[in-house]
Amino acid sequence: MLPVGQDRDDDPSQPERGRWWSLTLSAPFVALCIAGVLLLSLDAARHIEALATANSDSSQWSLAQLEVEFGSHQRALVTGAPPDLEAVRLTFDIFYSRFETISKGRLYADITTSEAAADFGAVTSFLAGSVPLIDGDDDTLRAALPAMAARAEAIRPALRSISLNGVRIFSAQADGQRFSVLRALIRITALTAALVLALAIGVAALWRLMQVARQEARRRARANHRLRAIVSTALDGIVVTDGEGLILEFNAAAQRIFHCKREDVLGRMAERLLFPDSVANHSPDADQAAQMGRRRVTAIRADGEHFPAELSVTLSEEGGNVLRVYYLRDITRQVADERELVAARDQAVAGERAKARFLAVMSHEMRTPLNGLIGTLELLNDTPLSPEQQNFLRIVRRSGDVLLTHVNDVLDISRLETGRFTFAEDPYDPVAVMRDVAETLRPTAVAGGIGLTADSTAAEGLHVLGDAPRVRQILVNLAGNAIKFTPAGEVGLHVRHDPDAGKLILSVSDTGIGIPPDQVERIFEDFVTLDASYMRAAEGTGLGLGIARRLVEGMGGHVAVDSAPGRGTTFTVTLPVRPAIRPRPPPEAEPVAPLPGRKVLLVEDNAINRLVATSMLVKLGQEVTEAFDGAEGLERAEQRRYDLILMDISMPRLDGVETTRRIRAGSGPNRSTPIVALTAHALPEDIARFREAGMQHSLTKPITRRALAMALADVATVTTPPDPVADAPPVIDRETLDAAASSLGPEVFRTLRGRFFDEMETGLTRLEERLKSGGAREEYAGDIHKLAGSAAVFGATALHAALKAQETRAKRAEEDRLLPGHTALLPIWAQTRQALSAI
């Protein structure tokens, strides 16, 4: 594939053609090389043979000459009347030198160590005996000549043997050399043949490579053509530079983006021309960073206009030549859109914050008068009233409850949207919940001439785990909506259980006006009603259905709607549930039992609320001291000790949170006194803020006498230490356990008991992990609450009491007492498990 900007003269197929011609011209040269190898081999063979022959002939001549020179010496010993002593000495020296050459030369080593070794010894002995005589005086030599001649005659056979052995050995060596030369020639021939074969294979391989290279060159040419088309038509600007940053290629999109022509920028520095303030110099680190992905830079057009661009860089290096390819996109429109989105997001966030502030303010502003209204009505109900007055009181109380429901709906929406809404997992009877809803709404239905029925035949005796109050709220919202939009007719509530799928199915049907198909989804939107006029017959905030669907989805279920104008509507709620043991029936509401007299400091700036709360506390037998704001409450808290402080939040001069902080930080008598918040701020972040300031509990307005009684009772359990012997609850409440076993049957009871064992073991382990990891106290308290509910179902009284005490510690921020309390749970659980296993 041709690089961007490559000319036709740089076609990669041209080097391939050069290699083809080089290969064609090199063939004769290869043939000449092969012929030269053969000729050299033959010539070397001839020289080797000649050399081997020459060496053999010289060695054999030396052996033959040894015998000739010995004969000359032997004749000199016996020739002449007076013997020629000089001739004897001369022939002896010649023979002696020849023999020394043969016996010590490397060429004759094989002879001296062969069968003729003994012969060499005899000659050596002869020479050793003759040397002193030859080197002596003439008289001695002349006298020894006969003896020397005799000894010389004796060694002649030894010399003959040495000569014959030499000839035989040299002949064998000559034959060996000839065979060695022959083997060498054979090897040379084989090597030459292998060379020829290798050259042939190489030529074939080169031919194949040449064919492949030609095909590849054609493919690369086609790919280069396509690449040129792609680059020229690409929507992104493409700029190619060399290692120095000089522009080599500039496509059409780049010309449109930078408002300049290709020929005007080729050969110029890209960084200085196109984006001088955004692209770093070409250091290795900069190159590596450039390939990290797309990044935003500020580029500059030919007319000097700066604009935002998205840039990515690709590096290519071959043979030391570096190419940089810049891919650039003008994102002026995108940046403008993003700024609009950010502005819209900021406005939405500001709107959400304003909404949260509005909810907090409205919660306080609405709950404060509601507290006085409902509290006064509760006090008024305890006074002698005529039947007519009681009827009026019921009407006013019902209106107050409706208004309180609307306030709670708005706050539920806020908690559900922020994900701060939690669901309980306690045993409950869905049939009882449905019947309770029907009884609650029946007066409203009867007043409108509507029949209200509750069908529970498909779920009698069923008990499941879940959040009964939220299920009740869902049914109330759906059934209340059905009653509103049914001018006349019937509203029916139905409940059934699908044990195979583990689903609880609740449905609410009516014969009302129905819903158009295009409006089905809108009815679940907040503050939406199909008739938004002020004269509508069905009143409400338009939050009920939205809250119902959020609650259902929060519990893992879903809501289905089947409706059509004129034929009514059916809402079907499907919730995942698990079966539960039938719990002990809750005790009926009883009048609040008298409580021990306590000293209570009531800090409240609203005179009506102060009057209502004081009246309720006095009727509960408490001694009340009033303070009209936080500053006065702080002053009174420093004067004497109280058993309980009820602290309003929103007050002039000094609010309840700051007052609590100062009480806790001071050294007065109420530094550790329980403080309970009286608040209309029901949002979770507000409750957390109260706890952080040092408040143990919060009572949400409007406050009832029962809520005050429970707060006082809770204080009594904290301030009055129980007798560990007299008040210790039994491990198992047999009455509760027997009732559960008889209602479930033996098989189901054993199954659920095993599940209870598993859940308790897992739950206690999870609690220990939360303590070690420093988990949130709210999550710890929630887990404790679930375990306590299961313990109560099985009549595990002692375990239930211990779990509730630990839950109380967690809710009161007593972190230092959580670990000891958790440790105390383990032996109680062991006793409980042993007792249940024995049944």
Image: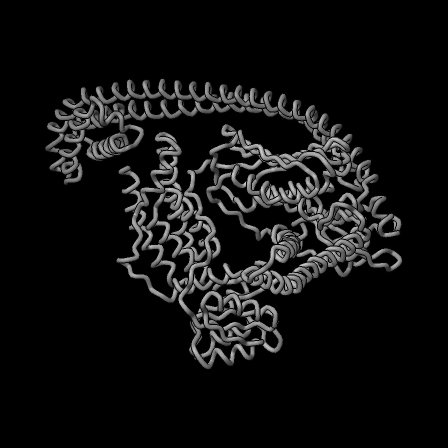
Left or right of 587? Residue 416 is right
Q: Is residue 734 visible?
A: yes
Return the x and y of residue 399 as percentages of the image width and height: 66, 55
Q: Is residue 254 above or below residue 599?
A: above
Q: Is residue 605 above or below residue 510?
A: below
Which residue of the protein is positioned furthest toward the front in this rendering? 386
Q: Residue at x 57, y 72 (%)?
A: 604
Q: Residue at x 59, y 21 (%)?
A: 201
Which image quarter holds the C terminus? top left
- Rendering quarter of residue 219: top right
Return the x and y of residue 542 as percentages of the image width and height: 71, 48
Depth check, front residue: 383 or 732: 383
Q: Is residue 237 above or below residue 378?
A: above
Return the x and y of residue 710 as percentages of the image width and height: 46, 60
Return the x and y of residue 145 as percentages of the image width and height: 13, 30
Q: Is residue 400 visible?
A: no
Q: Residue at x 49, y 32 (%)?
A: 460
Which image quarter holds the N terminus? top right
